[in-house]
Amino acid sequence: MIDKAKPDSSEGIIRLEDVHKIYQMGSNQVNALAGVSISFERGSFWAIMGPSGSGKSTMMNILGCLDHLTRGRYTLEGEDVSDLDDDALSEFRLRHLGFIFQSFNLIPQLTVQKNIELPLYYLGWDAADSAKRATELALRVGLDGRLDHHPTELSGGQMQRVAIARALANDPQILLADEPTGNLDTATGEQILNLLNELHDQGKTIIMVTHEAYIAAYAQKQLHMLDGKIDRIEENGNGTK
């Protein structure tokens, strides 16, 4: 029997097959992704790296169902999402993915509690269950006692913890983190990375974009991109923390 808290890591929760993304820039075509094929195992922790223009941001947008691929196949949680329209992608994203951004993307007019509850509002949860879930998640990420605060009353590290709690609200199996420590000092960034490690230990699949080698060392594997293609994949074992 497979432990549901730590799913079978051999199963590909995300699969890209010969994925291309072409942007039309005037009369020129830019091949942001040029035939990417890869499988991300369930319960794994990846870091995506590469220089500016390598395709790592485009890769994250495709993985996060924020953009459409030009051709190829993208299978997420066993479902082919390659040709879904914007509404269907949005619905799929809401139910299966959690996002953590460098700039936090919190709504300043809302309290910590309401920011955490936002995905649950769109999922149709009632107020009492949403409030209970937000309280549980605030405690989980070390923000108990801050639910009534607004983002402007928090430190950078606290805002990122709110963003992580919000990303966990819908209990996704996959967390996508785009430079999650980019706006934080080193000590606070390490706290956030340790929190991501804890979530990975609890069974979450984490894919993180970073340009810092010491941050990528927290992951199990490093995917290096160059000119829209996979340049190499490096194993970190269980991460070097």
Image (cartoon, grey):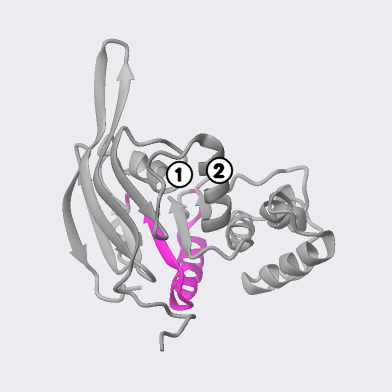
Describe the element under mark 1 as helix, strand or loop.
Answer: loop
**What residue is disc 2 on?**
90
What are the residue bounds of the magenta stretch? 183-211
Q: How many numbered marks are there?
A: 2
Residue 25 seen = yes
Return the residue found at the far bottom. 1
212 above or below 107? below
> Mark 2 Cα within 10 Å, few/some/many (few <14, many 20+)?
some
Across and down, in percent, residue 89 comes to 51, 43
Query: As displayed, is residue 7 above or below residue 74?
Result: below
| SS at mark 2 in the image | helix
Q: Quadrant of residue 134?
A: bottom right
Foreground pick, 222 / 124: 124
Q: Relative to 227, does residue 217 appear above or below in the rendering?
A: below
Mark 1 lies on residue: 65
- Image quadrant in which you'd find residue 113: bottom right
The answer to whether residue 207 is magenta is yes
